Amino acid sequence: MTEQSGAVLSEKTRALLERLQKNERTEQIIYERVANLVEKKSPHNAEVLRRLAAEEGRHAEIWRHYTAAEAKPDLHKVRRTVLAARLLGFTFAMKQMENGEEKAQQIYADLYAEVPEAAAIRADEEHHEAALLELLDEERLHYVGSMVLGLNDALVELTGTLAGLTFAMQNNRLVALSGLITGASATLSMASSEYLSARSEGKQDALKSSVYTGIAYLLTVALLVLPYLLLPAAAWLASLGILLATVVLIIAGFTYYVSVAQGLSFRRRFGEMAAISLGVAVISFVIGLLVKQFLGIDL
């Protein structure tokens, strides 16, 4: 047993407090560094992040009052999270980090008897900090609809096209050539359609919206065609298998990103997108096989 702040703490409680103190100090540094990262482009978001850093620092000081020691932050987590903020956006990185705190919050109940402040801090974690996170306003999230449009269309159209061509041609090089031509044309078509649609609605950011749509479409095309370019010409079945696995991974990755950044349900959105894309692929398999069989075309 150890005695701090006039209270006798068990070794288990002290260990939990040290763990929480380290985590709070780590997240304080993360919020401060990400605030510095976005300050020039977005003073509003920087201010919100510094308020979050102050909350974490206040919590760490409360735990230090009990542990009587300063916690060393997890610098690996700091670097990892700041890198994620640079690559995937600070809203995603911050909300993912806070979502990971749900497990940590389960230990607060074990502290109530010995540490009265635990209840108030848990309330902060669940309500105040969540409210602050909702104040974050990142530009790229304004165009999630455009990215979803490009991604969905590319997955549905290209998955079906490549699947059908795979059975019809049974040659990776021919499928890759056809897929690249189709994909490039479709990218330009989708981007221009999004631009015209946004302009007709009077949106001032029509060009930027079309760019997000085009980039999402083009990246999807590149990933889907890649196995047909890398594998031998006769390995069309292997390419088809990689194609389907890639589709599932793209859907899972993007759905996870959107669900975390916007606080949406992952399971429902993933099931919907996967069912549509893979359903179209199955239908296209059958069409490609029937075309090859009944028209007697052999390439």
Image (spheres, rainbow, N blue to C red):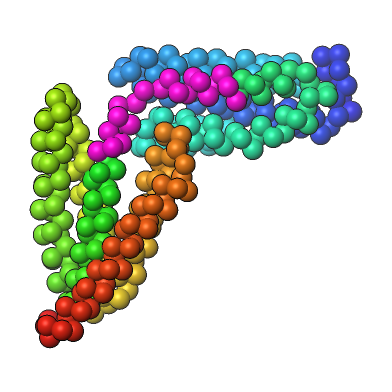
Q: Quadrant of the N terminus?
A: top right
Magenta highlight on residue 81: no
Seen from the viewer's position, the closer of residues 195 and 299 is 195
Q: Residue at x 27, y 77 (%)?
A: 235
Q: Give the number of callouts.
A: 0
Q: Quadrant of the C terminus?
A: bottom left
For the question of whether residue 269 can be seen, the reply is yes
Q: Residue at x 33, y 18 (%)?
A: 42
**Left or right relative to 272: residue 288:** left
Report the span colored magenta: 126-146
What is the x, y in percent for residue 63? 71, 20
Seen from the viewer's position, the closer of residues 48 and 278 is 278
In the displayed structure, 151 sits above or below 72; it is below
Magenta: main secondary structure:
helix
Seen from the viewer's position, the closer of residues 56 and 255 is 255
What is the x, y in percent for residue 101? 60, 33
In the displayed structure, 251 sits above or below 213; it is below
Seen from the viewer's position, the closer of residues 205 and 184 is 205
What is the x, y in percent for residue 231? 26, 71
Q: Residue at x 22, y 48 (%)?
A: 217
For the question of whether residue 252 can be seen, the reply is no
Q: Quadrant of residue 285?
A: bottom left
Q: Residue at x 28, y 37 (%)?
A: 145
